[in-house]
Image: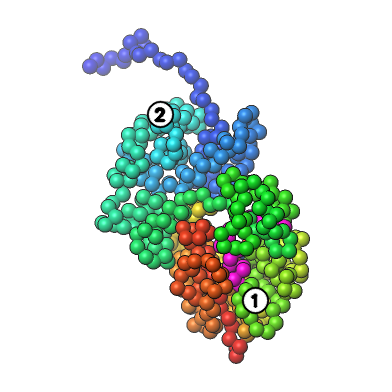
Amino acid sequence: MSDQPRRAGARRPHKPYRRPRRDPARIAAFEALRAVDERDAYANLVLPPLLRKAKEDNEGFDDRDAAFATELVYGTLRRQGTYDAVIAACVDRPLREVDPPVLDVLSLGAHQLLGTRIPGHAAVSATVELARCVLGDGRAKFVNAVLRRIAAHDLDEWLKRIAPPYDKDPEEHLGLVHSHPRWVVSALWDALGGGRAGIEELLEADNSRPEVTLVARPGRATTDELLTERDAEPGRWSPFAVRLADGGDPGNVPAVAEGRAGVQDEGSQLVALALANAPLTGPDARWLDGCAGPGGKAALLAALAAERGAALIASERQPHRARLVERALAGAPGRHQVVTADGTRPAWRPATFDRVLVDVPCTGLGALRRRPEARWRRRPEDLEGFAPLQRALLLQALRAVRPGGVVGYATCSPHLAETQAVVRDVLREQPAEWIDARPLLPGVPELGEGPDIQLWPHLHGTDAMYLALLRRPLDT
Ligand SMILES: C[S@@+](CC[C@H](N)C(=O)[O-])C[C@H]1O[C@@H](n2cnc3c(N)ncnc32)[C@H](O)[C@@H]1O
């Protein structure tokens, strides 16, 4: 071969330059992924303003485009572990050496190819156009080459190639097939117990979109009123719950706009209900929500307390979250007050309350359906950060309740280090009677062996909420 530079005339004729086709939905999805990646943003917070902007800037950008962009972002983030392994098998360098924006475009392409019904050729060409818009023509060629390799197999075939056999390494297998970090698979399995079928159902439930559930706050709205909404169905377990089937927009429900109803997972409703219904002898006049922000459970507790003539104090350490609690309680019946206070250094005297809820800060491993990026951001070390706070909040709750009164310890994580381990440790320091919470939720199956309860997305359709109910002994 000649080492003379080729004359221009000998080159293949250039195709005329064509501007890349702009697809506002895919561009919004890419920008959301960048924000999640670059500045640890939350997808559910960054996406709505991006979609509003896409609507303003692009005539014809409609609700279907917005739904498509949302599906791309949530689907890509949820399945990121699987897609990363597939992409790694298709590039000739370690993934950490691939530019993050390029990786985001590849992940969006992988999701369209392996996780949607978009035909392969359309998924590749639309993603290459996106790459041309947001990365430039040079890197779009790399994207094109990688996507063609990904498109050579379907998801099942890729899973056979990237995941070890179940029998060889069950946790790694499940982590890759169901796109969860290995340590999360391990922790969820420890909490759930049982064999392969249950954990697989749970991991898949984490990858599904949760229904929108409303709460009709007692005394302010009724489920009958909410059931007049389009595609509304009664809740499965909570007497206050109404589910909005696909496409339901709570923003359009008048009772929600007026604060008489709210958006609240049924698991959270059941926690508030179980605490309110725990048997109590003696007065039942003062209730405390010690970790109230943003106020979902406080709003339901306030309504339940008002029915009984009890007063609620809703306490929250962070001032901006305390303001959210104020907003959630605005217009609520009965007596209630919001205070900004650190629950580990209480602003009230010991033995003040008849019922206390502490819904403690946690890893949120029970709400992975809602926060698609959370599973990749959390680290096992986070547990060590939460542990002392969770113990301190429960200990102070047991001191704040009067002898004979009831404390509810709740987390939105089923991790045993955040649930039973905390309760057991605190009970060694501050003895209390562990009440069987299961009879307080009649009709709700599979609540575990008791006395505490653990809800699960795959069994109950709720977040994986945990609740332990503890009664302070009369002689303390
Ligand atoms: C899981 S969230 C509570 C959710 C709330 N119960 C609801 O249903 O809307 C935990 C809350 O505890 C608050 N928190 C964290 N540390 C606290 C402390 N030391 N004292 C009181 N609240 C605290 C957090 O700011 C957060 O708002």
Give the Cα distance between marks 2 and 1: 60 Å
Boundaries of the magenta span: 260-275
Task: Identify which amino acid the numbered label 2 is placed on.
Answer: His
> Vertical placement of 56 versus 328: above or below?
above
Task: Tell me which image quadrant ligand 1 sits in.
Answer: bottom right
Viewer-nearest residue: 328 or 275: 275
Q: Position of residue 452 (x, y in %)?
A: 50, 73
Q: Determine if the magenta segment contains residue 273.
A: yes
Residue hosting label 1: 355
Name which of mark 2 and mark 1 comes first in the sequence: 2
- State whether residue 264 appears in this view: no
The kind of secondary structure element at disc 1 is strand
Which quarter of the rendering shows the C terminus?
bottom right
Is label 2 in a helix, a strand or a loop? helix
Residue that carries the numbered disc 2 in the rendered image: 121
Q: Is residue 109 left or right of residue 301?
A: left
**Furthest residue toward bottom:** 475
